[in-house]
Amino acid sequence: MVNASTAPAATGQTPSRLRVLIVEDERDLVEVLTYNLHREGFDTIVAYDGNEGLRKAQTQLPDLILLDIMLPGMSGTDICREIRGSERTRHIPIIVISARSEESDQIVGFSLGADDYVTKPFSSKVLIQKIKALQRRMESGSETSDVIEHLSVRIDRSRHRAFHEEKELDLTPTEFRLLEVMLRQPGRAFNRHELMDAAIGEGAIVLERTIDVHIKTLRRKLGEMDLIETVRGVGYRFRERFT
Ligand code: CA
């Protein structure tokens, strides 16, 4: 694994404080979040409605966005879509703050490109942990870790080898990339477009069903059918844990 503290290039500068944009109309919650984020050494930018939130995301280019869904002006889902649709902002990690706990809301958030979510009411401690996890992921970013491991699956990117229960898998390059993308974020639902972009290349013109075919062979090679889960109406995800 790449150590977050060693990941940024040695520029000779001290790393700047992470700037978190909070888009949330509940002022009490904003106050609590701001207090806790400052205490953890983050800088904050605040927007109390959707339009202001999108504008600040686009103009101030924060390092991370905490995004409420139910907002006056523009909804969080629309903001998410805009942010992911623009070259300048699409890399910014988003944590959705959802008022509802239904899985469908979380899936909608993920399918729009959110990176993680918390459900109200949530503890600041949990949120800070999620922010730090995303921060580590960002810092490892382009220098991504060479070995990714989750449950019984391990892949070694530099050597282009994949293992299930220590047994090497014979994967095609496309299957390998598909597995890698999902394995990086276990539990996150990916839609077929995201998987196609990741596995085949952005803008590739292939049928969505192509992904289903690749997933099918990948599942067969993994042996355990339920490591890759079907998310109805969305796409696929790598199992987060066995319960
Ligand atoms: Ca709200």
Image (cartoon, rainbow, N blue to C red):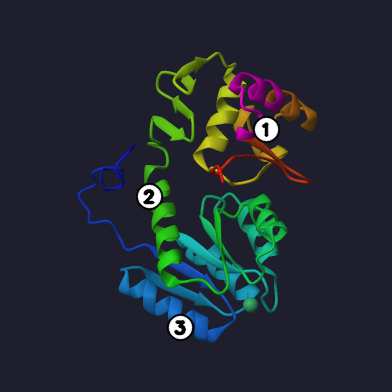
Which secondary structure lies at badge 2? helix
Residue highlighted by disc 1: 196
| The quarter of the displayed image where residue 51 is located | bottom right
* Residues rendered magenta in the picture: 215-227
| The quarter of the displayed image where residue 142 is located | top left
Task: Tell me which label, 3 or 1, sits earlier in the chain.
Answer: 3
Task: Tell me which label, 3 or 2, sits earlier in the chain.
Answer: 3
Mark 3 to mark 1 CA distance (whole Å): 41 Å
Mark 3 to mark 2 CA distance (whole Å): 25 Å
Which secondary structure lies at badge 1? helix
Q: Position of residue 132 (x, y in %)?
A: 39, 57
Ligand 1 lies in quarter: bottom right
Residue at position x 75%, y 29% in the image = 212
38 sits left or right of 53 in the view: left
Residue highlighted by disc 2: 136
Residue at position x 32%, y 69% in the image = 40
Residue at position x 56%, y 27% in the image = 177
Which secondary structure lies at badge 3? helix
Specify the label residue 31 is tagged with: 3
Q: Position of residue 109 (x, y in %)?
A: 65, 57
Front in this rendered view, residue 168 or 242: 242
Q: Position of residue 215 (x, y in %)?
A: 68, 27
Quadrant in which the N terminus is drawn: top left
Give the residue at the far top of this rendering.
170
